[in-house]
Image: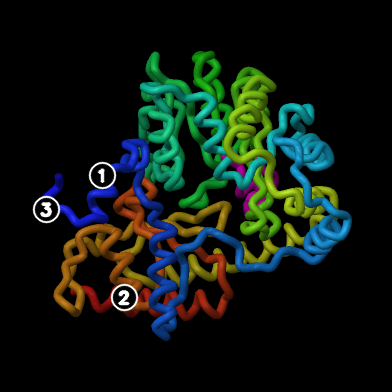
Amino acid sequence: MYPFLTIQEEKMNQLSQRLNALSESETLAMSQKSAELKAQGIDVINLSVGEPDFFTPDHIKQAAKDAVDNNFSFYSPVPGYPALRNAIVAKLKNENGLDYEPAQIVCSGGAKQSVCNAILCLVDKGDEVIIPAPYWVSYVEMVKLAEGTNVIIEAGIEQDFKITPAQLEAAITPKTKVLILCSPSNPTGSVYSKEELQGLAEVLAKYPNVYVIADEIYEHINYVGKHESIAQFDEIKDRVVIVNGVSKAYAMTGWRIGWIAAPLWIAKACNKLQGQYTSGPCSVAQKAAEAAYTGSQQCIADMRAAFERRRNLVLDMLKDIPGLQVNEPKGAFYVFPKCSSFFGKTAPNGKVIKDAADLAMYLLEEGHVACVGGGAFGSPECIRMSYATSDENLVKAFGRIKDALANLK
């Protein structure tokens, strides 16, 4: 039937259009490539992954051990155990000044699932979803899954990678259904202030059919003090879905616990959806997450201090690398330098650097440092580098980056 295709290619033709429309995650792909080089005995420093390099705190691990011993080995309620949801309600009240009921909380297998649940429950075919760029790689792919239409607002380094109220209002149409807002941001580390969020909220207040998915997973990794949530503004709170979880704040990426705090009807919808395709998240991980929220918070302060020290170290080293333009990220654990001055230059092997993806591959192959080209985040003139690794690794990595870039002609 397909005379010029291999059997494997023929099988690929049988996949759903839904799947074929998706792009592979470039962050995971780069992490895999760096792992392959490591397996060959090459000393690769991985700055591509978005996870803390710390171990989960001991009191949280102990709660998981206790959960196993106490036979938390059965299905949990779909939205999570009441004790965990109550702990999240208390966290939102005590840390954010926000009032929610346990029925408005839905726990899932990570914040990624929580975002996708909200998108699938709110977005229909043809609905427009506004996404500021730079954006986290999976947002646009999740909108594709929902058959929605991505509307990208570009916010460059000159505006600290943050959109303005005027930009937001210009992007809204009668088809707009959702705005996805991430603060602190992956991939830029930019943080919206209360005043900046209020400006966006005043625009959204004019459009009662537009909802907000507020990705706040990096809430506790910020260097400006108090986290500000767009859900604090009463005029739009009943249209905001907060997404958060334990992965970044408590070094619990592999435990896979995220959650939403949402208007009751949206929470019920996510509960219904999740009940049909994953059910409740891991029972033992839920008990660990409960301990994270109810136990000592000193671990957050300790890790944040380490990240801030590393950020300052990295910024100092970046300033010493000609051709890279960088802002000062106020949160998360990424820098997102503009690197377009290297486009068109030639590597020692004769290959021309056409874009940030080429530059990332060059740094991996020649400098043995893994980064991610900004095209995956909607900003092809930039490159993402994570500083979630040791000071020693960072010094070594940015020394290699400086040397490799100097060899481009």
* Colouring used for the render: rainbow
| Residue position for label 3 | 4
Residue 119: image x %, image y %? 51, 31
Is 93 rendered above or below residue 248? above
Q: Are marks 1 and 2 in contact (CB under 8 Å)?
A: no
| Residue position for label 2 | 365
Q: Amino acid at mark 1?
A: Asn
Q: Residue at x 45, y 55 (%)?
A: 327
Is 120 rendered above or below residue 351? above
Magenta stretch: dominant secondary structure: loop
Task: Specify start and end residues of the magenta stretch as a single range.
Answer: 215-227
- Distance (Cα) linking label 3 and label 2: 33 Å
The residue nearer to you, when weighing 147 against 240, is: 147
Mark sitting on residue 13: 1
Residue 111: image x %, image y %? 60, 44
Is 186 rendered above or below residue 95? below
